[in-house]
Amino acid sequence: MWQELYTELRPHGLEIVTVALDTGGITAARPWIEAASPMHPSLVDEAHVVGELFGVTNVPSGVWIDEDGMIVRPPETSYPRRPDFLDAPIPDDLTPERRERVEVVRKLRIDAELYVEALRDWVREGARSRYALSPDEVIRRSRPRPVAEAEAAAYFELGKHLHLAGRREDAVRCFREAYRRQPDNWTYKRQAWNLLLPGESPLEVYGGDWMTDVRRTGAENYYPPLDM
Amino acid sequence: MILETLRIDPAELERRTGWAIKPEGACKDDRCVPLPGAETGLLDVQMLAERLGMPLIHDEPSGLWCLGPEAGGKALSSARAPDLALPDATGREFRLSSLRGRKVLLAAWASW
């Protein structure tokens, strides 16, 4: 996904590191990584530590870090180009369910052009770029972490640990606790839904699935607007 | 972090949470929290959780504990990037700090 921009911007000083938030580990991420055959480091994060350390709650999310190791933009929606699904035509012969999904996906708020232009500006201008934020502004914009969300992080980590130990029912119980405490954390819930067995329904096990939850929050809130 | 007992090695605590145990207490970035009565050697996790505002949850069936991140502030308590260390696609550990001196875009994605 990022290889093209990496080729363009690396000669000008930008490194790109991708992190796959995948409790299924390299087995889950490998097909995508191999298809993209990236030259940049492609890391695998089974425990979603970038969620805990940086406050990532949805993907794709990008964080900018300067030459001194200072974050100059906290996590925000980062598409390297306008995704095809935003402009996908709606065929006439779709089932109502499929049609609703296509319509919802087209309503997601993604401004890839603005994001990539800002990234190019920062690579060119460095600290002078208007897109490079001060340390105080980075902290101010970073996601608040009330007690319930800190607990959600602990329950998610425990769920992941139990899942990988083969204790699926106990894992589900922990993922439910994480979900209840932080219902808008898409990385937790989409990961938990993804770990279900074929035939198991996210709606039955967790009381939610992608369409149900997007309907609840509104497609326009799935990705918060970029504040560049 | 997952724990089997309520005693933790300070080096492990620092590696996983960024909190370093120093004579003045538990320190992260430019903040230090005094730990009265903290002995040398293994630390009492319940005391740490309380002092640092971290949730400590217990899973009865497995007997495991999990210590969550500190609550009440922001996900980023400092703009200094945490030193992320994760395996790359070949299983080799990669440290974010190895790119110091270059600009970095850290791009999170998922296969699901």
Image (cartoon, coloured by chain):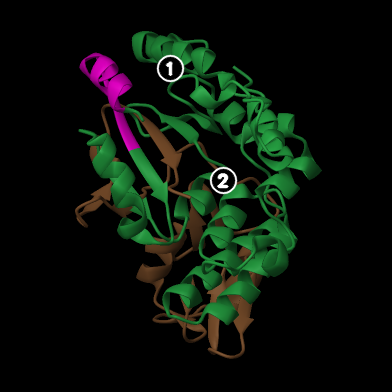
Chain colours: A green, B brown
Left or right of residue A89: residue A4: left
Q: Give the percent coordinates (x, y) of residue A2.
A: 34, 28
Which part of the image, by quadrant, shows the C terminus of chain A? top right
Would you say residue A185 is visible in this rendering?
yes
> Disc 1 is attached to a residue of which chain?
A
Q: Earlier in the sequence, mark 1 or mark 2?
A: 2
Relative to residue A112, is residue A73 depicted above or below? below
A7 falls in the magenta region: yes
Q: Give the percent coordinates (x, y) of residue A11.
A: 21, 16
Relative to residue A90, is residue A57 depicted above or below? below
Tag 2: Cα neighbours inside 10 Å, few (<14), some, or many (≥20)?
many
Q: Quadrant of residue A120?
A: top left
Query: What predominant SS class does the magenta segment belong to?
Result: helix
Q: Give the percent coordinates (x, y) of residue A175.
A: 62, 67
The residue tagged 1 is: A119
Q: Amino acid at mark 2?
A: Gly
Q: Amino acid at mark 1?
A: Leu
Residue in the foreground of this view, choosing between A164 and A64: A164
Q: Residue at x 39, y 35 (%)?
A: B106
> Disc 2 is attached to a residue of which chain?
A
Residue interval drawn in magenta: A3-17
Would you say residue A131 is visible in this rendering?
no
**Farthest residue in the right direction?**
A216
**Farthest residue in the front direction?**
A93
B56 falls in the magenta region: no
Tag 1: Cα neighbours inside 10 Å, few (<14), some, or many (≥20)?
many
The residue tagged 2 is: A55
Q: Give the percent coordinates (x, y) of residue B15.
A: 37, 62
Q: Residue at x 35, y 9 (%)?
A: A124
Left or right of residue A153: residue A41: left
Q: Residue at x 45, y 46 (%)?
A: B110
Q: Are marks 1 and 2 in contact (CB under 8 Å)?
A: no
